[in-house]
Image: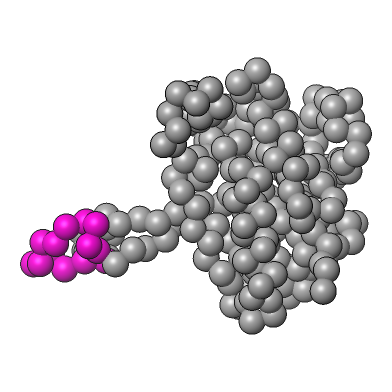
Amino acid sequence: MTYSIAAIVPMRHDSERVPGKNYRLFAGKPLYHHVINNLLNSSYVNTIVIDTDSPVIMSDASQYFPQITILERPVHLRDGAIPMNDILLNTVRQISADFYLQTHSTNPLLSTATIDQAISRFFASYPVNDSLFTVTRMQARLWDGLARAINHNPAMLIRTQDLPPVYEENSCMYLFNRTTLETRHNRIGERPILHEIDRYEACDIDEEIDFRLAEQLYILKRDGISDDL
């Protein structure tokens, strides 16, 4: 069976920590262009939707990506404290698809190959699994704020690479359907797949240093200076 997928990329005009980051030049192009181009190259994504309150992004996307759908975010959903799930509910109620893939412009290193691999894996396991989200493997000694060990026994000092892995939700990609989002008010269903991606592709831009680091990593990879990234 063939399923339709709508990719949703939410973007605010203002950013508190990195001003204008969604449309700031990144390796010669506005940041959001990178994830949009990778979605356009996907073998599975049928529709791409930008949800935004930014006149800059709306104008630029209309010029460079006329094939995608642009939704202007309603005023009542524009505050930075609004939960992402509320924004997504507004979008999925306007865009019809079997499944929705949500990602961010701030994940510019997320490749088309990884996007398609995750979708293919999800389709192969559905309906046993009802959703998917990407994670980053961690093998480190973790402690809580009361100096209590979380994932290791301090009396048994073993190598970090031998610790049982734990996984960080990296927010790079979520796959879900409308029913899951509406009934659970969450992108993650009852039986999710944790899809591991490497730290390079999971690089996320929250702070100015993240922007600069991600851009340098992207350039090194693009120019073949470091093929091991």
Q: Which secondary structure dominates the residues rendered in magenta?
A: loop
Residue found 80% across the figure and 36% down from its top:
53
**Which residue, as the protein is rendered here, is positioned at the far bottom?**
128
- Is 58 contained in the magenta span? no
Task: Examine the rendered structure and indicate whether residue 107 appears above or below residue 140.
Answer: above
Q: Quadrant of the C terminus?
A: top left
Is 145 positioned to the left or the right of 24 in the image? left
Residue at 66% from the left image edge and 45% from the top image edge:
112
> Is residue 127 left or right of 169 when viewed as pictured?
right
Quarter assignment of residue 70 = top right
Q: Position of residue 187 (x, y in %)?
A: 66, 64
State which quadrant residue 64 falls in. top right
Expressed as whole percent of the image width and height from the top left, the position of residue 89 reads: 78, 60
Query: Does the rendering let one see residue 155?
Result: yes
Residue 160 magenta-drawn? yes
Numbered circles on residues, count: 0
**Quadrant where the N terminus lies?**
bottom right
Give the residue drawn at x 89%, y 30%: 62
Residue 199 falls in image quadrant? top left
Question: Is 178 left, or right, of 142 in this rendering?
Answer: right
Question: Which colour style is shown?
Answer: one colour
What's the residue at 61%, 43% (across, down)?
111
> Residue 91 placed where, x, y %?
82, 54
Depth check: 196 or 155 in front?
A: 196
Q: Does the image show residue 185?
A: no
Q: Is residue 59 above or below residue 157?
A: above
- 70 or 66: which is nearer to us? 66
**Magenta range:** 151-163
- Residue 102 picture location, percent across and down: 70, 53
